[in-house]
C-alpha cells in the first residue's frame, strides 16, 4: 500500500513577484514577511509538514539568499532527519537572461535529476507564494481514487477575477474536459490554485515530450486534458494569491477579521524564529500608560506609547507618544516617532518616521502612482526598508519612498499624491 508521505514535493519559489514593488527589491516574493511574524512561504511549508509529507525540493532563482537563510536546514518545519529533508535547488542559470527558468514546467524540467534521485509514485508541485491551508494527504487520496494522471487544486472565484488564473471546465465527475489560461471572456468560475499532483512517470514523460512546452497552465495541462486523465480537486477554504500590493494588504487585514477564515495559529503555521532578527529573544510587547490599541496584531518586542488602530506590527516596532498608526503594516524594528501619523501604509523593516511627520495624508486615494499605476491605486503608500523620513514631512497617497532613502533626499516638505522619491 502506498503511503502519502512517500510523495515528493517540489515547491516553486523562484518568481520575481515584481508587482510587490519595493517589498521584493532585496528578496524573493516567498520571503516577504506576512502577518507580523511569518514569511509567505511559511504557509506552503507548514501545509506540507502538517500533511505528513517529508521530502521537499525548493526551487529558487530570484534573489534567493534571504529565502535560503529563512529555510535553513528545514528544522523549523520538522524536515530534518534521516528519512526527511528539505533541499534547496539553486538556480540553473547561465550569464544570459534566456538561461533563467522560462516557466513553471521549464523550472521542473531543469531539476529533473532531483526527481529521478527521489523515487516515488507521485510528485506534488506547489507555489511558494500563496496564503492558504490545505491537507495534501487528502488530495493525494483523491488523486489515487480517480486514477488520475494529473490532479489540479481548484476553487471557485468571482468571474471578474478569472482572467488572472487558469480556468478549468469539468464534467459531473470533476474530470477537466477543457482549459482556458487567463481567459478574458470566461466560460467557468473554477480557477487553478497552482497546486498539482502528477503521477511521477507521467510527469517525466510530459517533460520529455517537447522542451518548448515551458508552462503547466499554457502547455502541459491542455495537452494532458485532451489526451489523458486530468481531474479537478475542489477546495473550499481560504486561499489568497498575494502577488500585488493590494492583495497583500487585504490578506494581512483579513487577519484582523474573525469572519475571514484565515487563522495561522489554528492552521499550525510555523516559521523560522531564529532567522528573523533575533525574534526568539525578544521580550513581550510593552504598552505604556498613553497607549491605545484596537483591532491590531502587536508582535513581541514592540513598544507602544501612541495609538494603533487596525494595523499589524512586526517584532520590535516602536510607536511614540502621540503617534497614530492606522490601517497599516509595519515591518520589524521600525520606529514611528512621537506625534507622527501613519495611515494606510506598508512599511518594510527598519524604517524611521520622524516626529510630527504624516505618511498617508489627504483623501485623494484615486490619484494613482505615476511610475507604477498598476501597483498603487487605492491610497496605499509604500515605504522601502531602511528609509528615513524627516520630522514634519508630509507624504500623500499612493506614494513610494525608496529603500534606504535618507533624510537629505527630502527636498520638499510635501510628497504629493502618486509621486515617488
Image (cartoon, rainbow, N blue to C red):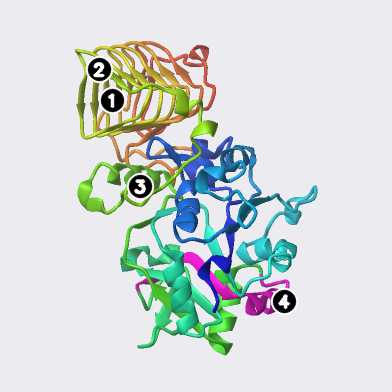
Q: For the residues marked 2 and 4, what is the alpha-carbon distance in whole angstroms? A: 60 Å
Residue 211 colored magenta? yes
**Does the rendering let one see residue 40?**
yes
Furthest residue in direction right, as rendered: 95
Asked if residue 31 is positioned above or below residue 262 in the image, the reply reads above
Range of the magenta residues?
Answer: 189-213
Name the residue at 41% across, 43% down: 245
Q: For the residues marked 4 and 1, what is the alpha-carbon distance in whole angstroms? A: 54 Å
Can you identify the residue that label 2 sits on? 306
Q: How many marks?
A: 4
Q: Secondary structure at mark 3?
A: loop
Name the residue at 35% across, 72% down: 189
Q: Secondary structure at mark 4?
A: loop
Can you identify the residue that label 1 sits on? 325
Cβ–Cβ under 8 Å for marks 2 and 4 = no
Name the residue at 49% across, 64% down: 194
**Location of the N terminus (image quadrant):** bottom right
Mark 2: few, some, or many residues within 10 Å (few <14, many ≥20)? many
Q: Which mark is residue 264?
A: 3
Q: Secondary structure at mark 2?
A: loop
The spot of residue 346 in percent (x, y) is 39, 33
Can you identify the residue that label 4 sits on? 210
N-term-proximal mark, 1 vs 2: 2
Amino acid at each position: 500500500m502506498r503511503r502519502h508521505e512517500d510523495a515528493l514535493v517540489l515547491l516553486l519559489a523562484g518568481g520575481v513577484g515584481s508587482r510587490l514593488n519595493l517589498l521584493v527589491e532585496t528578496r524573493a516574493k516567498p520571503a516577504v514577511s506576512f502577518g507580523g511574524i511569518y514569511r509567505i512561504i511559511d504557509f506552503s511549508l507548514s501545509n506540507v509538514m502538517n500533511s505528513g509529507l517529508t521530502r521537499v525540493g525548493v526551487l529558487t532563482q530570484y534573489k534567493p539568499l534571504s529565502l535560503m537563510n529563512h529555510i535553513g536546514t528545514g528544522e523549523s518545519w520538522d524536515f530534518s532527519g534521516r528519512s526527511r529533508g528539505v533541499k534547496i535547488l539553486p538556480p540553473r542559470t547561465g550569464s544570459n537572461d534566456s538561461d533563467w527558468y522560462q516557466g513553471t514546467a521549464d523550472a521542473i524540467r531543469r531539476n529533473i535529476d532531483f526527481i529521478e534521485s527521489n523515487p516515488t509514485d507521485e510528485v506534488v508541485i506547489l507555489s511558494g507564494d500563496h496564503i492558504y491551508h490545505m491537507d495534501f494527504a487528502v488530495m493525494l487520496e483523491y488523486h489515487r481514487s480517480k486514477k488520475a494522471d494529473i490532479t489540479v487544486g481548484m476553487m471557485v472565484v468571482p468571474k471578474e477575477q478569472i482572467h488572472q488564473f487558469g480556468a478549468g471546465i469539468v464534467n459531473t465527475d470533476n474530470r477537466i474536459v477543457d482549459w482556458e489560461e487567463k481567459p478574458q471572456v470566461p466560460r467557468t468560475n473554477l480557477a487553478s490554485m497552482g497546486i498539482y499532483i502528477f503521477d511521477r512517470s507521467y510527469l517525466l514523460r510530459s517533460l520529455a515530450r517537447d522542451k518548448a512546452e515551458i508552462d503547466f497552465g499554457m502547455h502541459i495541462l491542455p495537452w494532458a486534458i485532451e489526451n489523458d486523465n486530468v481531474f479537478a480537486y475542489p477546495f473550499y477554504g481560504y486561499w489568497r494569491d498575494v502577488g500585488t500590493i493590494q492583495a497583500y494588504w487585504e490578506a494581512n487585514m483579513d487577519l484582523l477579521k474573525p469572519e475571514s477564515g484565515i487563522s495561522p495559529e489554528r492552521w499550525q503555521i510555523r516559521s523560522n524564529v531564529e532567522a528573523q532578527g533575533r525574534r526568539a529573544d525578544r521580550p513581550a510587547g510593552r504598552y505604556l500608560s498613553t497607549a491605545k490599541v484596537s483591532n491590531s496584531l502587536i508582535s513581541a518586542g514592540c513598544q507602544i506609547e501612541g495609538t494603533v488602530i487596525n494595523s499589524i506590527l512586526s517584532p520590535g516596532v516602536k510607536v511614540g507618544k502621540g503617534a497614530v498608526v492606522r490601517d497599516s503594516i509595519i515591518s520589524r524594528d521600525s520606529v514611528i516617532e512621537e506625534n507622527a501619523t501613519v495611515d494606510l501604509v506598508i512599511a518594510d523593516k527598519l524604517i524611521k518616521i520622524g516626529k510630527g511627520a504624516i505618511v498617508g495624508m489627504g483623501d485623494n486615494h484615486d490619484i494613482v502612482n505615476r511610475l507604477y499605476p498598476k501597483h498603487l491605486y487605492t491610497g496605499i503608500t509604500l515605504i522601502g526598508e531602511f528609509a528615513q523620513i524627516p520630522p514634519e514631512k508630509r507624504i500623500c497617497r499612493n506614494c513610494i519612498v525608496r529603500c534606504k532613502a535618507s533624510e537629505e533626499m527630502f527636498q520638499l516638505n510635501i510628497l504629493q499624491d502618486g509621486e515617488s522619491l
